[in-house]
Image (spheres, rainbow, N blue to C red):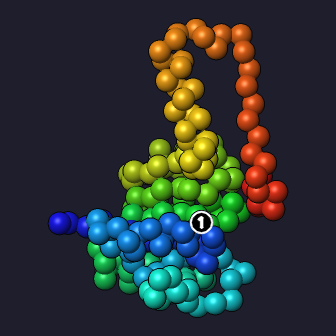
Amino acid sequence: MKTVNMMINGLPGNVAAIIAGHALDDPRITLLPHSLTGPEIQADRHTIAGTVIELIHPADRDQKMDALIKLHGEFISVDFTHPSAVNDNADFYCRRRLPFVMGTTGGDREKLIQTVRDSTICAVIAPNMAKQIVGFQAMMEYAATTFPGIFDGYRLSVRESHQAGKADT
């Protein structure tokens, strides 16, 4: 079975660590033992389920990424870094022709979308990847498609409130 090479960025953050743990358990994925991290992170490594993952700081990312691309060939970057890094990381992925999934919310979303449109790569950008929000979006799409006009004249707002300490609430 052919596997997909994947780099999970944002370690040692909670979401990146959870996703990396699942990737390690999935036989369809080869998790690269490297992760882009933020300038505030002091550690050089993070261990998940016995797998040591090198943390790559912003100052080293260009040089290290060149080596990783040579070593591993094509791979998908899955980004769960800090909201302040969204646009810079997207620019970086596009310049390097690295397809990516932007799981981090925040940043300038219009600029993010335009950056991808102006590039030659594929990307998945979701406004929110929490399973409850994704499920709610699917329910609303189903209702709107199945019952045309059912929401005419209505306005709905949803506010995420479960993580008051999040950087991008």
- Relative placement, left or right, of 146 versus 14 is left
Q: Confirm whether residue 89 shows in the render.
A: no
The residue depicted at 59 percent of the width and 66 percent of the height is 15
Residue that carries the numbered disc 1 in the rendered image: 15
Q: Is residue 97 above or below residue 64?
A: above
Please provide percent x and percent y for residue 137.
57, 34
Element marked by disc 1: helix
- Relative placement, left or right, of 127 versus 29 is right
Please provide percent x and percent y for residue 119.
44, 51
The residue depicted at 71 percent of the width and 63 percent of the height is 84
Which class describes the residues within 10 Å of circle 1: few (<14), some (14-19), or many (20+)? some
Question: Which quarter of the picture shows residue 158?
Answer: top right
Camera-side residue of 113 and 23: 23
* Residue at the far left in the pictured view: 1
Q: Is residue 52 above or below residue 30?
A: below
Please provide percent x and percent y for residue 25.
38, 71
Q: Confirm whether residue 169 shows in the render.
A: yes
- Relative placement, left or right, of 99 versus 116 is left
Please provide percent x and percent y for residue 164.
82, 57
Q: Amino acid at mark 1?
A: Val
Q: Is residue 19 above or below residue 143?
A: below
The residue depicted at 76 percent of the width and 61 percent of the height is 167
Camera-side residue of 94 and 48: 48
Quadrant occupied by the N terminus: bottom left
Q: How many marks?
A: 1
